[in-house]
Image (spheres, grey):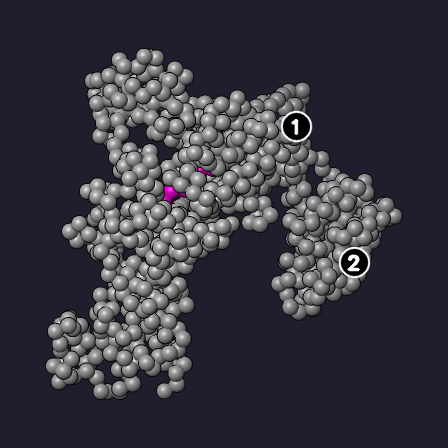
Amino acid sequence: MQRVGVFVCWCGSNIAGTVDVAAVAEALKNEPGVVFSTDYQYMCSQAGQDIIKNAIAEHNLTGIVVCSCSPRMHEATFRKTAAAAGLNPYMVEIANIREQCSWVHKDMTTGTEKAIILGKAAVAKVNLNTPLTPGESPVTKRALVIGGGIAGIQTALDIADAGFPVDIVETKPTIGGKMAQLDKTFPTLDCAACILTPKMVDVAQNEKIRIFSYSEVEEVGGFVGNFDVKIKKKARYVKEDICTGCGACVDKCPMKKNPNEFNLGMDNRPAIYIPFAQAVPKVATIDPNACNMLKNGKCGLCARVCAAGAIDYTQKDEIIEEKYGAIVVATGFNPISMEKFDEFAYNQSKDVITSLEFERLTNAAGPTAGHLERPSDGKSPKTIVFVQCVGSRCDACSEKGKEYCSKICCMYTAKHAMLTRDKYPDTDVYVFYIDVRTPGKNFDEFYRRAVEEFGVKYIKGMVGKVTPEGDKLKVQASDLLSNKQLHIDADLVVLAAAIEPDKSARPLATMLTASMDTNDFFTEAHPKLRPVESPTAGVFLSGACQGPKDIPETVSQAGAAASKVIGLLAKDKLTGNPCVAHSNELMCNGCSSCERVCPYGAITYEDKEFRMPNRTTKIRRVASVNPAVCQGCGACTVACPSGAMDLKGFANSQIIAEVDAICK
Amino acid sequence: MNKNFIQEEILRSSGVNPKKCMKCGKCSATCPAYDEMEYHPHQFVSMVENGDIEPLMNSKSLYRCLSCFACIDRCPRSVQPAKLVEAVRLAVVRQQGKNHLTANDIPELIDDETPQQLLVSAFRKYTK
């Protein structure tokens, strides 16, 4: 028989306001096994913990029940208290009489009644508790970063800096991500490439970092500290280790008319290409859908001009298997499609562009070498209209847009408008805004400079429609402050399209069993206190995959994620959760039900020899649980038809005892 | 009639929740009849929200709305301003009792600017 101590917490007035704590302590005194029962103002305080420690020693307790807040809050605290007093920490049960009782009840009588019942259930359970010892698992000291944009680059550099090897998996032929496509960065107007490319070179030269470019994560298994990952390295038909990036093949390739992804289709690239001059790795890639040699077996010009002999038309996709201790998701964002916004004539006119396209149009390495020209006829635009919040802040039932604020558009639009006025002072620049949101260091000052120093015309209101007419774009908009409808003949219209998580994020989340919100942004373990960790152990979040972010925020989060990874990889062993499933081999009938429902792949079957009557033996197929992989979800215990599968710490008998105590 | 009662009536019959409006003005930006109106679509929304109904009921703007529903189509917040205009029109008609639009009233309303379709739809709506 256990010797149980009951400790009822007031939580100030949080619990004591709705629950008669003294009555609860008194009522639980009479429960089986209870030898000591008391109440105190704050059990989690040092004085409260001392009460518990002293009672364990004085009354020789073998189990304790703390009637307090949710176990998510203080279970770990009270387990430590018990351990300090020499009690096995798994002999502690929490009855949640705050979140599940005092906070949801108004009446003292019902509150007290329910608190007593919850306490009785916990006492009934602790009577059946057994001391548990957590297992340990080793940590693979290598990290995987999925996504090679500024978020992934910064995370990888920081992890490598601490001495741990890192692999970056990037789906494009080069790392760099969205930042590589930008012209200048707000609010300081540093050139994006000038600050990004040195970091890309650092990544390439860092001995601890491997880059798997043009690659995708194919499969993820295992668990924190021990992930098994399959990475598909797509065939680029160029030997990466031999190619020098000289570009001779790019010049000679006859298949020149393919939309250039890096410039968002605003110019063309050959079938064999290097995305941009500072690409890392600087290696050519053949587009199999455009290459005549790969499609029809005719051509082979690139192989002939390649002095290094790097072209390999027979290259196949390759699967790389590697073990990792931690995984960082840095899959980033994309602007949403403008297809559904007919009113802005994005599909009708080449001169209606998105802000990211505008970045390429003003970038010295872009399709126009940095000269602001209209995509339709190459003329210099004299009147430019910027439209904010296109697809952001939409109603939940809107099919076109997103409910959230995309956060970065106010600032990059101010930047675009300011730079246009600076470089082309004879251009009229209008910005239509709903609100200007500039909560960042030097952000509002930047926006005010655009208005006051550079004469950008900010108009409170929205553009209603854009109609291409001749070589003009007729813009109809409202000016809410002067209560007028405006008609502007524009040469170029720039849409600040909402941003959304990359499409690869959802299948990846499924592979990682990491949770996402309704917008497909990865969910953090705690919105305030654990912002860079996924609720899935060992999976960390970096950059815009978690929510819209600008570059400084992304870099800070990348560093934070890296520090969490370093903290994990610095450990030699991880203490596991001892509340895992185990199978009673004598009862197991080998039906495989548990194996099918296990979401973590923790259950395997093995043939085992059992002694039978009359000195005979028999080989039977029985389930076996890998305690390091098992997360203790309990799905197998429910699926098992013979009752062989049970969960330590939450045994079927314990659950039934709780239910009995409640129903008594 | 009680001001709050009319406001509630208008909200009920239109099914519009003006609190969803984020005051972007896209309805007024998109409205083809904007210049004909004394009160513009975005003002309809805020005036109904504030219970400022009487000036709306007395305004010619009510009959300038073409019911083209461009504002409904383009509103990012799904507020449906045209439905509010329609509901205010209905409130006016209901206050008039049986004194609805008759065929005799039409010639007076015809001018070069008002599309015929508007008159046809109004006649259909306000005649038994």
Question: Residue A21: where, in percent of width, then height?
Answer: 75, 62
**Chain to which mark 2 belongs:** A
Helix or strand or loop: what does disc 1 sit on? loop
Tell me if I can see residue A175 in this picture. Answer: yes
- 10 Å neighbourhood of mark 2: few (<14), some, or many (≥20)? many
* Residue A336, magenta (yes or no): yes
Looking at marks 2 and 1 on the same chain, the residue that comes earlier in the sequence is marked by 2
Q: Is residue A642 left or right of residue B108?
A: right
Name the residue at 65% across, 35% down: A576
Residue nearer the viewer, A367 or A123: A367
Disc 2 and disc 1: Cα gap in Å?
Answer: 40 Å
Question: Residue A441: where, in percent of width, then height?
Answer: 51, 49
Name the residue at 24% across, 20% down: A252
> Which residue matches tag 2?
A40
**Chain to which mark 1 belongs:** A
Name the residue at 49% across, 23% down: A205
Q: Please tell me the numbered disc located at residue A572.
A: 1
* Residue A381, magenta (yes or no): no
Badge 2 amino acid: Tyr
Badge 1 amino acid: Asp
Dominant secondary structure of the magenta stretch? loop
Which stretch did the figure color magenta?
Answer: A330-337
Q: Is residue B46 left or right of residue A198?
A: left
Camera-nearest label, 2 or 1: 1
Whether A193 is drawn above or below A65: the answer is above
Q: Residue furthest right?
A: A58
Question: Residue A157: where, in percent of width, then height?
Answer: 53, 30
Q: Is residue A528 left or right of residue A382?
A: right
Q: Are marks 2 and 1 on the same chain?
A: yes
Helix or strand or loop: what does disc 2 sit on? strand
Q: Is residue A346 left or right of residue A208?
A: left
